[in-house]
Image (tube, rainbow, N blue to C red):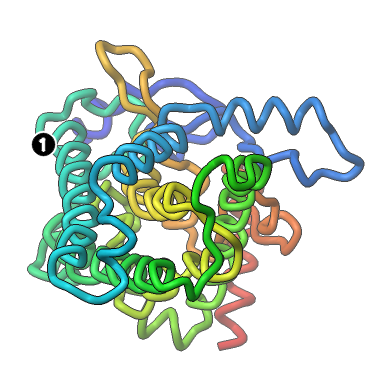
Amino acid sequence: MAHVEENAQVREPAGQSRDWNYHPDLPIRMSPVFDLPPKPKAAVAWLLGTWLKLTPPVSHMIFALLVVSFVLPATVEMQSFSWGWVGTIAAITFGTVLLLGTALHLYLYVFAGQKMRLKFDVRPMEKSARFTFGDQVWDNFFWTMASGVVFWTGWMILYFYFAANGWVPTLDSFGTSPIWFVAFFFVIRFWQSFHFYWIHRLIHIPYLFKTVHHLHHRNVNVGPWSGLAMHPVESFFYFSGILIHFVLPSHPIHVMFHMFSLSLGALFSHAGFDKLLIRDKKAIEAGSFHHQLHHRYFECNYGSEEMPLDRWFGSFHDGTQEATQRIRARKKLIFARK
C-alpha cells in the first residue's frame, strides 16, 4: 500500500482516469486528416505537430540519411550475395536496436532517470514463469533480437538485392522526381498505419492470437524491449510493409526511413513513458498511450493515430471510462463467438 501511495505522489494530473499513473489529456484524439467534412486547418496542424517532432519521425529521417550516406554498401556490391554487404546490413539492424533499446531501458528502468514521472503503468517489469527465462526483460530482449530484428534484416537484404539487380522500381536521386521523392514520405507514413492495422487485426484472429500474437501480448505493462518482442510469424508479417517498395519507386532513404520507423519506432512506442525528460523538461516524445491501451484491453486500438481505422470499425479506445466499458463489452462478444 505504501508503494502505491509513493507512486501517487509523482502522479501528474491529466484528464479524468484513475486507472493509470499518468496519461495524456482525455479523450485522446485520432488524426483529423481523414475527417469528413474536411478540416484542412486541423489536418495541417496535426501533421505539423506530429510529423515534425524529434522522434518520431524526424530522428528516423536523420538515421536514414546518415546510414545511406555513410554506411549502406554500394549498389554494385549488392548485386550478388556476399558476407560483406549482408554483414553490413545486419550490423545496421542489430546495432541500432541494441544501442537504442539499451539506452532507453537503462535510462528509464535501471537508472530511473525520471523515476515514475510520465510513466503510464505503475507496475515494474515482471519476473514470472510465463516469460521466457522467467523474466520479462530478458524474454523481450531475446525475442527482439532472435525474431524481430532477424526478420527485419532478412527483408532488408531481400529488398536491396532485388533493387541492386533492377528487379524493383527505384529512384536514383532527389532530382529524378523531386515531387514524388518528397510525397512518398507521406505515403509511407499512411501506408505504415494502414498495413499495421490490418496485419494486427489478422493476428488477433483467435487461432493466430493463441499460437502467435500471445507472445507479444504477455506484455500487459510494456517497456522498450517489448516493441519488437514477437513470434517469428508476427515478425515476418510486421516487416512485410517493406513490400510497398517492391511496387513503387523508392530511394534507399525511403526504405531506411520506413524500416527505422517500424523498428526503432516500436522501441519508443513501447517505452512505457509518455515523454523522456531531460533536466525535468519534456524533451522527447516516447511511448504511445494509444497503443498502451491496446496492451491493457487487447481488442481495441489495433492501428495507430495516423489513420482512423479503429474509429471507423468500432475498435477505438479513447482512454475514457466509457470507452473501457464499451471495449470490455465488445471483448465479451468476441470471446463468446470463439
Q: Residue at x 39, y 46 (%)?
A: 265
Task: Report the residue that reaches farthest toward the front.
Answer: 76
* Residue 8, position as x, y percentages in the image: 32, 26
Quadrant of the image containing the N terminus:
top left
Query: Observer-nearest residue: 283 or 254?
Result: 254
Q: Residue at x 55, y 88 (%)?
A: 338
Does any portion of residue 214 appear in the rendered image?
A: yes
Asked if residue 48 lies left or right of residue 156, the reply is right
324 relative to 240, above or below: above
Task: Report the residue that reaches farthest toward the right.
Answer: 37
**Residue 277 sits in quarter:** top left
Q: Look at the numbered disc 1 and give the secondary structure of its residue.
A: helix
145 relative to 30, above or below: below
Neighbours of disc 1 within 10 Å: few (<14), some (14-19), many (20+): few
* Residue 240, position as x, y percentages in the image: 46, 71
47 relative to 319, above or below: above
Does any portion of residue 213 appear in the rendered image?
A: no
Q: Residue at x 51, y 24 (%)?
A: 14
Asked if residue 12 lies left or right of residue 116, the reply is right
Query: Observer-nearest residue: 72 or 274?
Result: 72
202 relative to 181, above or below: below
Query: Observer-nearest residue: 337 or 261?
Result: 261
Give amino acid for label 1.
Val
Q: Which residue is mark 1?
A: 110
* Residue 2, position as x, y percentages in the image: 19, 31
Asked if residue 26 lies left or right of residue 97, the reply is right
